[in-house]
Amino acid sequence: MYQNFIDHMREAFELSVPKLYVQPSIRNTPDYLKSFYKLVQLKLEKVKASRGRGDFFNYIKTAQKFRKKLLKYRRNEEVKLLESSGVSRFSKKAKYLLKPKNLKIPTLANAQGILSVTNAEKAELLAESFESQYVNPPLLNFELPSNFKSPQEIPWVTDAEMLSMMLKCKTSCSQTPDNVPYKFLKIIAHLISSPLAQLCNLSMMRCECPSLWKESIVIPLNKKENPTVPTDFRPISLTSQLCRIYERCLLKKILQHLDTIKFWNNDQHGFRPKKSTVTCMLEAVNDWTESIDEGAQVDVIYLDYAKAFDRVPHEILLEKLVEVNLNPNLIKWIRSYLSNRKFSVKVNNELSTQKHSQCGVPQGAVLSPILFGIFVNEIPSILPAGIRCKQFADDIKIYTTIPKSDTIEDHETLMQSAIDSVCKWSENSKLALNDSKTLQEAECPKHLSWKKYKQQRGEESANYLTPSDG
C-alpha cells in the first residue's frame, strides 16, 4: 500500500515540477536581486552576439553592481540573524559558512593496500567498511512479556499533527530512497497529510514499518582532516522523507511519555529541552572550579564509545524500551523499524550495492538519538557514591573531588571502582570503549604545580584507562 502511495507521489512530481537550474549564488535571495541577475545575463548574451567593446564594458559595469548589491544583502542578512536570533541559530549559520563546500573524497586504500580511484570503487569500499562495523548479532526473536502492560496509549497521529510536521520540514533537496523532496511535500502538504496520517496509523496498528523506510543512502563524512582509509569516515544516513516526518510525530509522544515517568537522569544533557553540550560543560566546569577554589584536587575521566550508534544491540535496546513502559505497538513498530535495514553509500553521483546493517541505530535518523539516550541513561546510577558524572549522548565525563585532608590513594581506589563499573556495564551492553579517546586528567591544588603534582603521584597510580584485575 505504501509503495503504491509513493509511486503516485513520484508520478505527480515528475508531471508537475519543471526541471530548472537555479544559480546557487542567487538562491534564496529577494526578487530584485534575481531580476538584476537576469539583466546581467542579458547583457552577457548581448556581448556574445555583438562582440562589441562598448557592450563588454557595459556588461562588466552591470556585473560589478550586481556583486556589490549581493554582498551588501548577505552582510545585512548576517547582521539581522545575529541581532534577532539566539546563539544556537547563529552558530549553525557560522558553521554552515565555514564548512568546506563540494568536499571531495580522495583516493582510498583498503586493508591490503589496493587503491580505490573512481567514485564507484570508493562507494563500494566505504560500504564494505561501514558494514563491517556492525559487529553485534542481528535480532532474531524478541517477544514482549506475556503480562506486559503500558500506561502509554497507542501513538496515533492525527491529520492536524501530520500537517503541522509536514509544514515544519526543511526545504532540503538531498536524495533519499523515496526520491520525493521536502519542498514538494510542503507544497502539497494540505492534500496528502490526511492519507499519510492514515497510512502511518495503519503501519502502527500492524506494527510493521514499510520496507522503503528501512532503506537509507549513506553519505560518508570525514572524521580527519586528510582521510586516507575508509575508517576515517563516519556514515550519515539519509532516510525516507515521509518516514522522518512520522518519526518526528512519534518522537514527540515518546518524549512526553519519558517526561511523565521522570525517566531522564539529571546528568544527561542530550536529547532534552533546554539541555546541550554547553549546559553539560558549564555544570562540569562549575563543579571543578568550586573544588579547585577550595584548594581541592579534581580527577576527571573522559569516556567515549567506539562506533556507539552503529553497535547498539537491538535485543538489549528493546528490553530497555519495555522497562520504560512504552506502548506495546510502538515497541513492536520500533523492532520492525530496526530489523533488516539496508543502505547504499553515495559518492558524488555513484551508489554502492546495498549492504545490511544488522545492529545499531542509523546515524542521521530522527529516532536514533532518543533510542541511544534510553540505552545509556542508566550509567550514572551504576557509579559509586562520591563519583559525579556528566553525559551528552556517548560522551561521558566522570570525576571526583579530593579535599586536601584526604589521601589520594583512597580516591584512586574509588575512581578505579567507577571505571570497573562502567567497563562491566559496557561489556554487558556489548558496547566497546574507545581507548584512544578515553583519557584521564588531574587538576592540582593551587599551592602545587602540575609538574610537581604529577611527580608525586607517579604515572602508574594515575592510570585509570583499564579495569582493575578481579
Image: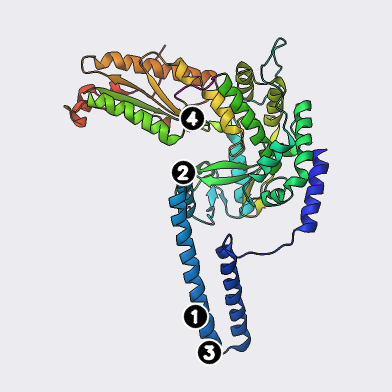
Q: Which residue is mark 2?
A: 88
Q: Which mark is residue 48?
A: none
Determine crowd level at label 3: few under 14, some 14-19, many 20+ residues with C-alpha closer than 10 A.
Answer: few
Q: Which mark is residue 53?
A: 3
**Of the image marks 1 and 3, the number of the one nearer the N terminus:** 3
Residue farthest to the top? 147
Q: Residue at x 59, y 50 (%)?
A: 122
C-alpha span from label 1 to label 4: 55 Å
**Of the image marks 2 and 1, the number of the one nearer the N terminus:** 1
User: Does the residue at mark 2 contact the one at mark 4 (Cβ under 8 Å)?
Assistant: no
Query: Can residue 60 be seen?
Result: yes
Q: What residue type is disc 1 on?
A: Lys
Q: Secondary structure at mark 3?
A: helix
Q: What residue type is disc 4 on?
A: Asp
Q: Which residue is mark 1?
A: 61
Name the quarter where the C terminus is drawn.
top left
Front-most of residues 105 and 291: 291
Q: Which residues are magenta?
A: 262-267
Q: Is residue 324 found inside the magenta-colored segment of the image?
A: no
Q: Residue at x 77, y 39 (%)?
A: 194
Q: Which residue is mark 4?
A: 394
C-alpha span from label 2 to label 1: 39 Å
Q: Secondary structure at mark 1?
A: helix
Horizontal and vertical percent position of residue 137: 64, 25
Q: What residue type is disc 2 on?
A: Ser
User: Does the residue at mark 4 contact the one at mark 3 (Cβ under 8 Å)?
Assistant: no
**Of the image marks 4 and 3, the number of the one nearer the N terminus:** 3
C-alpha span from label 1 to label 3: 12 Å
- 232 vs 26: above or below: above
Between tags 4 and 3, which lies in front?
3
Horizontal and vertical percent position of residue 249: 66, 34
